[in-house]
Amino acid sequence: MLRIVLFLATNLAVVLVASLTLRLFGVEGYLRSQGINFTSLLLFCFIIGMAGSVISLLISKWMAKRSTGTVIIEKPSNATEQWLVDTVAELARDAGIKTPEVGIFPAQQSNAFATGWKKDDALVAVSAGLLNRMKPDEVRAVLAHEIGHVANGDMVTLALVQGVVNTFVMFFARVVAHLIDGFLKSRTDGEGGLGFMGYFGVVMVAEIIFGIAASAIVAWFSRFREYRADEAGARLAGSGAMVSALARLKSETELPDQMPDTLRAMAITKGQTRSLVERLFASHPPLDDRIRALQEASYRQ
């Protein structure tokens, strides 16, 4: 449950900060006293909502390195690092993108992630545990999966989806607060209403509620892009190797997960999800479903 709370908190953070910004610039007071111009409100929420999402995208590489302790391979110091750099370069060339930065982060669980604000300025990193326990063809498949994320532009599209979601969360929260304020005033001949703190409190509560619901939409898109990245990994490294890598990840789901929650949507695995709530808000599909999808696609071919 803690993972779900942290995942939702990350998505809500941008919206709540944007709300405070609206209050500091006096926009809330104008909307309450002059009535709502829905077009202007939607435009303003779009600008604030997208701005927070775009800023998060632009600093994604810096945040990834800092939060995971990823060490970039500037100059390979051993045969493993040289193979890793060469393999990423080969896969990137086959995918038609510029070679990303390559790094290793100190986690015992087999895992990997890709991030970056554009295809030709990305980062691909793998855990030390993955390098130690997976076979070379499995590691190559994991790298191909991450290259697939980069080539598909998943980081950018996920940021855009989150920005649109933020927009509507902020918009509908203010519409609800305005309607409640108007209802209370109508009951007291215009003398009542929510007041300054009441209005702002309703907005915050509504944003949290709408934000939780909206997080399910973002999580659905994240799961969808995992299937696409698996398909890309199968094309670049072979379907058998991709299935084998996912099966290996499945066997390690009981190990401690050291991937920060803020990067979980960019990692190759989050482990298995069991409850309905976990499935609804999970950033990754169950590994069994991903393996089955690859096997069915291979059978059709």
Image (cartoon, rainbow, N blue to C red):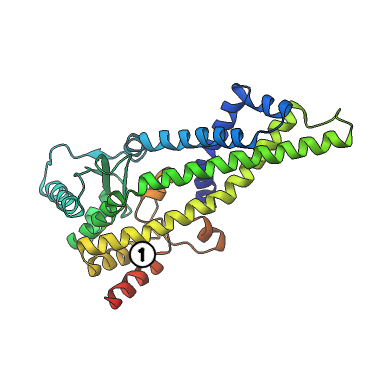
x then y, percent, for residue 34: 72, 27
Is residue 94 left or right of 214 when viewed as pictured?
left
- Residue that mark 1 sits on: 250
Q: Residue at x 41, y 59 (%)?
A: 224
Please identify the residue farthest to the bottom as the structure is shown: 299
**Quadrant occupied by the C terminus:** bottom left
x then y, percent, for residue 9: 53, 42
With respect to residue 188, does 162 lie above or below?
below
Q: Is residue 20 visible?
A: yes
Crowding around mark 1 (Cα neighbors within 10 Å: few <14, some 14 to 19, many 20+) is some
x then y, percent, for residue 93: 16, 51
With respect to residue 33, does 244 lie above or below?
below
Q: In what element is the residue under mark 1?
A: helix
Q: Residue at x 19, y 62 (%)?
A: 137
x then y, percent, for residue 296: 33, 75
Viewer-closest of 98 and 274: 98
Q: Residue at x 47, y 37 (%)?
A: 50
Q: Residue at x 61, y 34 (%)?
A: 41
Is residue 28 left or right of 281 when viewed as pictured?
right
Q: Is residue 283 visible?
A: no
Please identify the residue farthest to the left as the structure is shown: 79
Q: Amino acid at mark 1?
A: Lys
